Every structure is written in structure tokens, then in C-alpha cells.
Image (cartoon, helix red, strand yellow):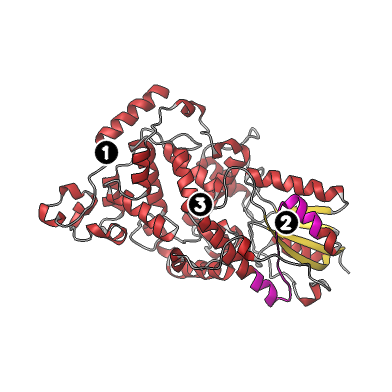
């Protein structure tokens, strides 16, 4: 007999079976384990996008199948978690509800409400780690406060680093199933089962995450340092959507990449973004550096529309925005370029860019998205200095030297040769014949000077 007769495992941002601490813990202490997912997004101003909903449905289908293969089942319900979780607990007669901790401010508030509702009816609550390598409170400065700069955070992380050994497969089988499964709602509530063209680039679910990780370790990891900034090459892991939906754990990735320090450093950068959002939850909407609240951002809807549609006249920027539209993802180097262009060339508030990314990225994660945009705008922790303004032409020539990335996503420029593809206005009239590519929306040199003058007013 286990410590508890019946335990519910509440799934949310951790849609996998392997290395799932809450599931493994439940299987170790319970006679009966009931997996539960509640479709309840926090009312925190960051609603799930259509693309995220489509991915979520696919991932839940994959998780449900994986559980059925092990003699279990995933119970899906809609509604307020603070009402649904206690309701299901009473239906099955659970003594304990266990879940992996969440860190987004809205999710933390929601989970506190659920904990309180469960305890009020005498049901125990237990939370475990699993979404991060270290809890946000575990990495502290020598004075006990949070870090604002990544490099010392990374050094401290290395001092307290654990083995991070993934857990064995949980002992989940038919013997852990209840005599009668509670009813489950249909997944159409999340998203219809139709196709989306961007799905051809992805395989949502734990199996897709496993294949992506294996493929990267086998064929991409050795060249990661050399190729990670090259959008024209397959030089990154493309694990970000799988990490966002918890289809693979950071511990699994940490172990799989072995001693690849530069890639492990990127995993810790992810930890740093959660560290910041945990300690400064207001930064999802407001700059960490308060002086930027008074920055003279522009209200430029035409510029914003051209940026969104990939029609700025700067090929590397437009290629990135079109890649986002077509695939639901954008190469990280290009994310920095397009973010710099929006905030420093067009002087459009970083919050608008963050919202657009949130609505269109399949890997949209509030901590990472916030960190990335505040870094690019120069208003966050460890931010790129505001006076460092990416030159989109130089960035294109450096990281897409042969123009292959631009030609892939801006096909109207495929006839341009050499470096002129990154500065079409330098191409010959004959090369440009028949193309309808727009003129640059701004002169980068002039825009840079305007941005620097505005920065000098608040520094």
C-alpha cells in the first residue's frame, strides 16, 4: 500500500511522461494515480494565441496517447482550476493533489487559489520542481538579493550546479488506474482538429521533442558555437517550443548535451529570464529600468504594420518577420535584429513587439519573451546598451553572408547577387527589374542618431 490511496497529478506546462517529478512522486506514494489537465488560462493579460492553442491540442493528444499506452488516461476539463481541481479530487476521492511548480505571475496566483481551495476541503497539496534546473529563489547574490546581470548569475549557477540526472520512467501501469475513470471533456474546446500550414515544420508532443533533441545532439551540437548565429544554417536546437510546453525537461536537455558549455549557458539564460520575472513580475508590462517609463516612444501604426508584415525595406528584418508568419518561429539572432529595428530605428515601444511575438510564436514564453525584448530595447536587466543599435545591413552581411536566408523568405530578391541582397538599393537597375520590394522605411543612419539623442536625454 502507498502513503495515499488516490493521488491526482495536475498537468499544465509539463506535457510529458519522462522526467516528470510530480508524476514520478505520485507513482511512488499512491495506489491510484489520476492525471488531470484543466483548460484554465490565467486572466493576466496574456491570453493563449491561436497558434499556441493548436500546439497545445496536439501536445495533449500525444500525452493522452502516451498515458493510454501505459494503462492510464488523461482527464481533460474546462473551467476555473480553483473549482475544477477540488471537484475532480472529490469525484475520485483523492487525498493528495500534486503538480510541478509554475512561475509566471498569473499562474502562481492561480495555483495559490487552487492550493487554498483544496486545503479548505481537507485535501493535501504538494508541489515539485521540474520546469527549471533551479528554483528562482535558489540563486542569490552574496547579499541575498536577485541578480540583474547574467554573467555573475552564470558563475553562481556553476557553483551550485547539480548533477541534474533525469528520473527513470515512472511506474505507471493499469494497476495505478482507478476502478472508474471520471468523465473528460473534448479537446475541441481548445482548438479544432484542423491543419495549420506552419505545423509542417514541427511535431508537437513528447515524441517530437525527443526526436528534435536527438537530432540536435547527433548532427548539430558539434557545430553549435560556429553556427548558432547563422539563420541560413540549421545551427540551433529548435527545442524552444518543446521546452515551452514542457514536452522535454531542462534536465533531459542538460544531460543530453553533455559538456557543451556554450549550449548549457543558453539553458541557464532561460533560467535567468525566469529568475527576473519571478522577482520583478511587473516587467512583463513595464521596463525594469524605471527611467525608460518616460522614454519618447512613437505612435507609428504604419511603421508597425510594415514591420509586422516584413515590408520595412531591410531584407534581414523582413526575412525574420516572414519566417515568423510562415513557421511560427524565428531564429534567435534575427529576433534580436528585428527587435532592435522596431525599438531603435522605428522607436516603437518594445511592449508592442512583445505582444506581436506572443501572438505568433509557437514558443512564446512570458519570461523569455519579456527578457528578450527588454534586452533589445535597453531597458531591462543585463540589457544591450541603448546606444548599441544593430545595423540591419551589417548584421545581414555578417550572419547571412550568401543571402540564403533572405532568399528563402524574401523570394522577390532571389535574383540579387552578392552582398547587394542585404542592401537592394545598391543593386543595379537590371537586377531590380520586375521586383516590387519596398524602399527602406527609414534611413538607418539618421534613425540611429535620433535614437541616440533621445537616449542621451534620459541616461
In the image, residue 268 above or below residue 344: below
Query: Local crowd at mark 2 within 10 Å, few (<14), some, or many (≥20)?
Result: many
Q: Residue 250 carries which label?
A: none
Q: Please name the residue shown 29% across and 55% down the image.
A: 400
Q: Distance between the residues labelled 1 and 3?
A: 36 Å
Q: Which of marks 1 and 3 is nearer the N terminus?
A: 3
User: In the figure, residue 33 lies in which quadrant?
Assistant: bottom right
Q: Quadrant of the C terminus?
A: top left
Query: Local crowd at mark 1 within 10 Å, few (<14), some, or many (≥20)?
Result: some
Q: Give the range drawn in magenta.
A: 64-88
Q: Quadrant of the N terminus?
A: bottom right
- C-beta proximity under 8 Å, tags 1 and 2: no
Q: How far apart are marks 2 and 3 (CA)?
A: 27 Å
Q: Earlier in the sequence, mark 1 or mark 2?
A: 2
Residue 451 picture location, percent across and down: 34, 31
Q: Report helix, strand or loop for mark 1.
A: loop
Asked whether residue 101 is in view, the answer is yes
Camera-nearest residue between 29 and 74: 74
Residue tagged by mark 3?
A: 265
Number of labelled discs? Answer: 3
Residue tagged by mark 1?
A: 442
Q: Report helix, strand or loop for mark 2.
A: strand
Query: Local crowd at mark 3 within 10 Å, few (<14), some, or many (≥20)?
Result: some
Q: Earlier in the sequence, mark 2 or mark 3?
A: 2
Left or right: residue 217 compared with residue 2 = left
Q: Please name the residue shown 78% across and 48% down the image.
A: 115
Residue 152 picture location, percent across and down: 54, 40
Left or right: residue 308 compared with residue 398 = right
Residue tagged by mark 2?
A: 99
In the image, residue 197 above or below residue 48: below
Amino acid at each position: 500500500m502507498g502513503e495515499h490511496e488516490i493521488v491526482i497529478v495536475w498537468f499544465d506546462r509539463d506535457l510529458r511522461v519522462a522526467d516528470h517529478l510530480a508524476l514520478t512522486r505520485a507513482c511512488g506514494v499512491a495506489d491510484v494515480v489520476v492525471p488531470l489537465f484543466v483548460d484554465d488560462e490565467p486572466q493576466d493579460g496574456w491570453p493563449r494565441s491561436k497558434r499556441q492553442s493548436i500546439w497545445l491540442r496536439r501536445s495533449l493528444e500525444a500525452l493522452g496517447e502516451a498515458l493510454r499506452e501505459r494503462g492510464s488516461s488523461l482527464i481533460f476539463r474546462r473551467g476555473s482550476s480553483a473549482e475544477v481541481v477540488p471537484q475532480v479530487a472529490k469525484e475520485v476521492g483523492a487525498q493528495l493533489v500534486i503538480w510541478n511548480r509554475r512561475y509566471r505571475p498569473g499562474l502562481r496566483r492561480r495555483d495559490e487559489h487552487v492550493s487554498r481551495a483544496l486545503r479548505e476541503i481537507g485535501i493535501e497539496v504538494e508541489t515539485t520542481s521540474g520546469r527549471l534546473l533551479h528554483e528562482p529563489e535558489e540563486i542569490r547574490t552574496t547579499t541575498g538579493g536577485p541578480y540583474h546581470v547574467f554573467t555573475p548569475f552564470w558563475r553562481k549557477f556553476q557553483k551550485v550546479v547539480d548533477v541534474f540526472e533525469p528520473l527513470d520512467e515512472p511506474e505507471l501501469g493499469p494497476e495505478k488506474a482507478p476502478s472508474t475513470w471520471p468523465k473528460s471533456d473534448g479537446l475541441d474546446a481548445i482548438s479544432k482538429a484542423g491543419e495549420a500550414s506552419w505545423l509542417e515544420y514541427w511535431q508537437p508532443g513528447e515524441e517530437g521533442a525527443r526526436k528534435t533533441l536527438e537530432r540536435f545532439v547527433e548532427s548539430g551540437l558539434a557545430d553549435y558555437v560556429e553556427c548558432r548565429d547563422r539563420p541560413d544554417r540549421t545551427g540551433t536546437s529548435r527545442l524552444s517550443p518543446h521546452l515551452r510546453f514542457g514536452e522535454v525537461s531542462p534536465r533531459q536537455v542538460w544531460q543530453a548535451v553533455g559538456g557543451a558549455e556554450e549550449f548549457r549557458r543558453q539553458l541557464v539564460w532561460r533560467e535567468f529570464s525566469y529568475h527576473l520575472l519571478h522577482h520583478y513580475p511587473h516587467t512583463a508590462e513595464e521596463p525594469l529600468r524605471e527611467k525608460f517609463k518616460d522614454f519618447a516612444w512613437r505612435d507609428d501604426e504604419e511603421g508597425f504594420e510594415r514591420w509586422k508584415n516584413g515590408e520595412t525595406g531591410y531584407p534581414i528584418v523582413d526575412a525574420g518577420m516572414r519566417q515568423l508568419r510562415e513557421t511560427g518561429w524565428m531564429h534567435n539572432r534575427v529576433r534580436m535584429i528585428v527587435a532592435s529595428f522596431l525599438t531603435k530605428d522605428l522607436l516603437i515601444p518594445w511592449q508592442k513587439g512583445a505582444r506581436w511575438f506572443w501572438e505568433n510564436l509557437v514558443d512564446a514564453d512570458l519570461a523569455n519573451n519579456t527578457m528578450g525584448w527588454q534586452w533589445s530595447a535597453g531597458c531591462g536587466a543585463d540589457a544591450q546598451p541603448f546606444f548599441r543599435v544593430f545595423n540591419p545591413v551589417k548584421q545581414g552581411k555578417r550572419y547571412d553572408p550568401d543571402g540564403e536566408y533572405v532568399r528563402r523568405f524574401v523570394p522577390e530578391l532571389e535574383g540579387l547577387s552578392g552582398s547587394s541582397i542585404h542592401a537592394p538599393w545598391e543593386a543595379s537597375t537590371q537586377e531590380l527589374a520586375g521586383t516590387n520590394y519596398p524602399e527602406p522605411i527609414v534611413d538607418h543612419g539618421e534613425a540611429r542618431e535620433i535614437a541616440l539623442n533621445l537616449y542621451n536625454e534620459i541616461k
